[in-house]
């Protein structure tokens, strides 16, 4: 077997391993965030309502962390697609159609998405939006649960600083997330590099 075919096949195995790893990481982050949020809700109710004010930060951290895992999933999917297409051309490996199945069954590459939820509709996309909606609800519920304590138990400068910090982090995450995922900045970079480095 040609060295370039062996090398491409090895890289494909590595990318497929990354796909699996970042799927696992996503659900690990979801479990961790859910556990911490539930603990904060219970502690806020049982000990001090001020504890609820940590919930929006944890929800935001969970959202950005899972999106980070998704960004690596996009990376590994783009590269594994590139490698499968290369092997199909040069090694007559026409059975390598995982990238086609993923495009139809999970989410499509190179299209506008809310992280990995876009068109055509898929269960994968629905679950992404489902977790997003739960995260937003948790963020708002935590802030609402601690709202009265924020203004009654904390000095005004501290309360204002809390809201300013939370707002800054939230807005920055939204701006960067929209640019990277919805507007496709991240995928555009990948597509550009792969197009420039496609062997004949």
Image: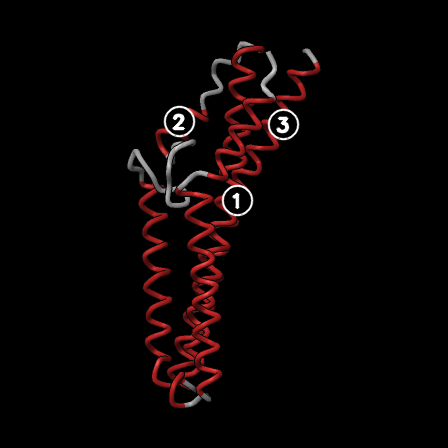
Marks 3/1: CA–CA distance: 17 Å
Marks 2/1: CA–CA distance: 18 Å
Q: Is residue 171 above or below residue 89?
A: below
The part of the image, by quadrant, that contains residue 147 is: bottom left
User: In the picture provided, is 102 more to the left or to the right than 7?
Assistant: left
For marks 3 and 2, the one nearer the N-term is: 3
Q: Secondary structure at mark 3?
A: helix
The part of the image, by quadrant, that contains residue 102 is: top left
* Residue behind mark 2: 101
Q: Is residue 22 above or below residue 98?
A: below
Q: Is residue 104 above or below residue 58?
A: above
* Residue behind mark 3: 11
Q: Secondary structure at mark 2?
A: helix
Residues 171 and 28: in front is: 171
Please give the name of the residue rendered at 48% of the width and 70% of the height, measured from the top-left corner: 165
Residues 182 and 144: in front is: 182
What colouring style does the render use? secondary structure
Find residue 28 and report its horizontal and vertical position in percent.
50, 54
The part of the image, by quadrant, that contains residue 122 is: top left
Quadrant of image for the N terminus: top right
Find residue 161 and report its horizontal and vertical position in percent.
48, 77
Marks 3/2: CA–CA distance: 20 Å
* Residue behind mark 1: 22
Mark 2 and mark 1 residues within 8 Å of each other at the beta carbon: no
Please give the name of the residue rendered at 50% of the width and 26% of the height, measured from the top-left corner: 81
Quadrant of image for the C terminus: top right
Rate crowding at label 2 as few (under 14), some (14 to 19) or many (20 or more) other CA atoms within 10 Å: few
Find residue 88 and report its horizontal and vertical position in percent.
52, 14
User: In the picture provided, is 12 more to the left or to the right than 94?
Assistant: right
Rate crowding at label 1 as few (under 14), some (14 to 19) or many (20 or more) other CA atoms within 10 Å: many
Given the current orientation, which residue lies at the most extreme left position? 121
For marks 2 and 1, the one nearer the N-term is: 1
């Amino acid at each position: 077997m040609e060295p370039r075919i062996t090398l491409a096949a090895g890289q494909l195995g590595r990318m497929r391993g990354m796909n699996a790893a970042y799927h696992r990481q996503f659900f690990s982050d979801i479990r961790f965030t859910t556990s911490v949020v539930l603990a904060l809700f219970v502690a806020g109710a049982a000990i001090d309502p001020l504890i609820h004010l940590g919930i929006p930060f944890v929800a935001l951290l969970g959202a950005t962390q899972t999106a980070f895992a998704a960004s690596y999933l996009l990376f590994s999917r783009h590269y594994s697609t590139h490698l499968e297409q290369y092997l199909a051309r040069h090694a007559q490996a026409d059975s390598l159609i995982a990238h086609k199945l993923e495009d139809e069954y999970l989410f499509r590459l190179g299209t506008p998405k809310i992280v990995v939820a876009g068109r055509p509709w898929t269960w994968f996309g629905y679950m992404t939006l489902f977790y997003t909606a739960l995260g937003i609800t948790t963020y708002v519920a935590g802030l609402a649960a601690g709202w009265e304590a924020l203004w009654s138990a904390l000095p005004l400068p501290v309360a204002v600083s809390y809201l300013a910090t939370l707002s800054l982090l939230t807005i920055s995450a939204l701006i960067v997330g929209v640019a990277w995922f919805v507007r496709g900045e991240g995928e555009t970079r990948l597509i550009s590099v792969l197009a420039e480095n496609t062997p004949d």
